[in-house]
Image: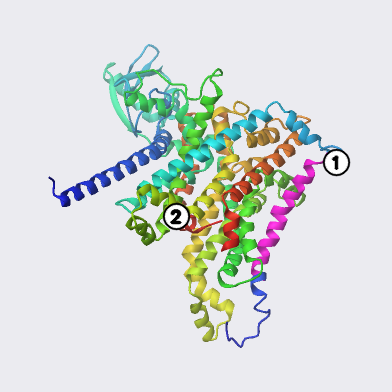
């Protein structure tokens, strides 16, 4: 017979094992696609057309140059073949430089290429081996250079996000404060309206907004989109700010007023600084909402697309190179993921606490 | 409440209303006005402006309407149910704190936090014949060197396979964050009550059915209704994977008529018709769910 104490411990250990096994499996399933899009965004164009695709990127390109039929024969180390593979045979240094730039992500000058060619001549046709490092972010730089509108669209998206934060935080924050501090008629109805607004799909607001925004001259302008995005975001801002203000004891404000501050002063000097971290979280939430949105942006822009629309179009066209597409997707994903990291605790709280 | 002697420039009883007023005005201008506009528009002839039911008739006659409706219906009903059940099962397994739980729950938020176009980029580069998924299978030795699986199908692939793929990709996006919501809800439950259930001789299933799930109901209702609303609006991932019109869904039709074939005579009528129909379906589904799940009764009782 086994000691019941040991039996208990064994069972506990088994349960722990099972827990970690489940956690590990979920993590793998969720993170593998994220890992691969990251890897893809760092591959050279030559690697991006290989099959199977490499499992990790390299930033040092190993090459070999020797005499070829037409001039100089360039070969590149291929990880799948585990051998040098010939890629270009030319005597034109400029052509070779362009190849390196487009397919290998390198940025050599013509002189550097010529130098290697001279080395080949000097060795009497013996192959010359050399390895050059490429810039880690070369795909990202290329994406923004070759994608039409990418940079202005990025700026517009940031403007839209900033304006959405301003609108939703000022309007929603005021209501959130009222929810936290006062009892008033229609409080419950208003609480429910916040959810009701979300029940009408965003795309169904975007279609009539074309006319409404055109009438006030904001169609195809960043401001017009932030007006629309704020509709969805304000509701959540009311929820978040209300819970933040509720967590700050009203007695602090009252104490300030005992010492002669007005209600407004008490709010500005005492409550607002205390609420700042929570308000920052609400702002990040608004940022993510505005930054990620695509369908209304497609409908409400014509010549001034947002960054998400630009990435959408490169993906839809899909004539582009996979590694550049991945770089665009990553550029889109990064701000959203970073801000989510900062507000993760609030998301847990928010979801845990919000009830219909 | 306060004894300040300062002159008030408005009555304190008015303050909450003044603070809430901007939200109401904002909703009136940028929510109610568009809603009313689009509903009125949908009953008007796009050219003459006369009252007509023609827009809806056109939509119902569209050869893609019923496929789009049923595709959306299948995707929504399977994915919402599947995502919820899997997320609930997983969250019951791992809702206790464990080493690394903080970082784990953050990682789970990533798929939902990702912009839809980034999710599109991930799966488009993954599911093509030369994509990373097949490459991974080759590296793992599951797939023979040089072989590939056509995940996105060929023109002859049966539709249920494409729908299955869409549901799986959607599940990847959604399950982790629903799980996080449910875990947050589970952690807020009073432990004593659950323990009392065991003390009185309840089995795990009995405690789950009679104590945990009923107490978790508000969280579940919120999670499911928000999920339902956004699930019916699925379109972007489908268009990025399959292009327009291959697997038509309702919102995809709106974008199709508004952007892709805007020169067409019937495009404006189709756009408003589809828009109002989609809006009606989303609102009706959400309200129906809330009604059936008893959310309104809870509101009265509390």
Count of labels in the image: 2
Kindly identify which residue carries mark 1. B51
Comparing labels 1 and 2, the label whose residue is closer to the camera: 2
Quarter of the image for residue B229 reads: top right
Q: What chain does badge 1 belong to?
A: B
The residue lying at 52 percent from left, 43 percent from top is B115
Q: Could you say whether the residue bearing mark 2 is in a helix, strand or loop?
A: helix
- Quadrant where the N terminus of chain A lies? top left
Range covered by the magenta-colored residues? B18-44
Q: Earlier in the sequence, mark 1 or mark 2?
A: 1
Which colour scheme appears in the figure? rainbow
Question: How far apart are labels 1 and 2 at the CA level?
Answer: 49 Å
The residue lying at 35 percent from left, 23 percent from top is B138
Kindly identify which residue carries mark 2. B185
Q: Residues within 10 Å of mark 1 (few under 14, many from 20)?
A: few
Magenta: main secondary structure equals helix
């Amino acid at each position: 017979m086994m000691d019941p104490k040991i039996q208990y411990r064994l069972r506990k250990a088994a349960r722990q094992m099972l827990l970690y096994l489940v956690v590990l499996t979920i993590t793998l399933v969720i993170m593998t696609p994220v890992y691969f899009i990251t890897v893809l965004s760092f591959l050279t164009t030559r690697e991006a057309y290989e099959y199977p695709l490499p499992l990790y990127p390299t930033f040092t390109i190993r090459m070999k140059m020797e005499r070829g039929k037409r001039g100089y024969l360039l070969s590149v180390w291929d990880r799948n073949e585990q051998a040098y593979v010939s890629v270009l045979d030319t005597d034109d240094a400029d052509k070779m430089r362009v190849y390196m730039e487009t397919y290998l992500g390198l940025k050599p000058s013509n002189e550097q290429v010529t130098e290697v060619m001279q080395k080949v001549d000097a060795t009497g046709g013996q192959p010359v081996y050399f390895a050059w490092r490429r810039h880690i972010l070369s795909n990202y730089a290329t994406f923004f250079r070759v994608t039409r509108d990418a940079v202005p669209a990025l700026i517009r998206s940031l403007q839209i996000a900033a304006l959405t934060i301003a609108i939703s935080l000022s309007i929603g924050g005021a209501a959130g404060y009222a929810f936290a501090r006062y009892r008033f008629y229609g409080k419950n109805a208003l609480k429910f309206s916040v959810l009701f607004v979300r029940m009408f799909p965003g795309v169904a607001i975007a279609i009539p907004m074309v006319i409404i925004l055109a009438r006030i001259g904001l169609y195809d302008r960043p401001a017009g989109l932030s007006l629309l995005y704020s509709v969805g975001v304000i509701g959540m801002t009311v929820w978040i700010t209300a819970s933040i203000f509720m967590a700050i004891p009203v007695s602090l404000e009252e104490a300030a007023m005992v010492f002669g501050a007005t209600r407004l002063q008490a709010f500005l000097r005492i409550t607002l600084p205390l609420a700042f971290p929570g308000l920052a979280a609400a702002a990040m939430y608004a940022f993510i909402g505005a930054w990620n949105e695509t369908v209304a942006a497609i409908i409400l822009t014509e010549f001034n697309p947002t960054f998400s629309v630009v990435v959408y179009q490169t993906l839809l066209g899909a004539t582009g190179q996979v590694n550049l597409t991945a770089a665009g997707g990553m550029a889109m994903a990064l701000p959203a993921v970073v801000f989510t990291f900062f507000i993760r605790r609030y998301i847990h709280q928010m979801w845990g606490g919000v009830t219909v | 409440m306060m004894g300040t002697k300062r002159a008030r420039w408005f009555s304190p009883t008015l303050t909450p209303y003044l603070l809430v007023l901007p939200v109401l005005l904002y909703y009136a201008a940028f929510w109610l006005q568009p809603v009313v506009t689009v509903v009125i528009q949908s009953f008007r002839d796009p050219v003459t402006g006369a009252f007509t039911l023609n827009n809806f008739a056109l939509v119902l006659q569209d050869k893609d309407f019923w496929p789009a409706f049923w595709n959306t219906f299948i995707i929504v009903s399977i994915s919402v149910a599947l995502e919820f059940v899997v997320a609930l099962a997983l969250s019951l397994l791992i809702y206790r704190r464990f080493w690394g739980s903080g970082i784990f729950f953050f990682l789970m938020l990533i798929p939902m936090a990702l912009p839809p176009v980034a999710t599109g980029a991930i799966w488009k580069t993954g599911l093509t014949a030369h994509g990373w998924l097949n490459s991974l299978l080759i590296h793992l030795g599951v797939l023979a060197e040089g072989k590939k699986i056509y995940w996105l199908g060929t023109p002859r692939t049966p539709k249920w396979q494409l729908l299955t793929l869409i549901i799986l990709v959607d599940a990847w996006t959604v399950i982790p964050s629903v799980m996080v919501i449910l875990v947050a809800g589970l952690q807020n439950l009073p432990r004593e009550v659950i323990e009392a259930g065991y003390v009185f001789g309840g089995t795990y299933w009995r405690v789950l059915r009679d104590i945990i799930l009923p107490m978790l109901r508000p969280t579940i209702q919120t999670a499911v209704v928000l999920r339902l609303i956004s699930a019916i609006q699925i379109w972007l991932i489908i268009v990025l994977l399959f292009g327009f019109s291959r697997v038509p869904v309702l919102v995809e039709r709106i974008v199709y008529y508004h952007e892709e074939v805007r020169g067409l005579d019937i495009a404006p009528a189709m756009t408003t018709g589809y828009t109002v129909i989609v809006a009606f379906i989303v609102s009706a589904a959400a309200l129906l769910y809330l009604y059936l799940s008893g959310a309104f009764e809870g509101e009265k009782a509390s």
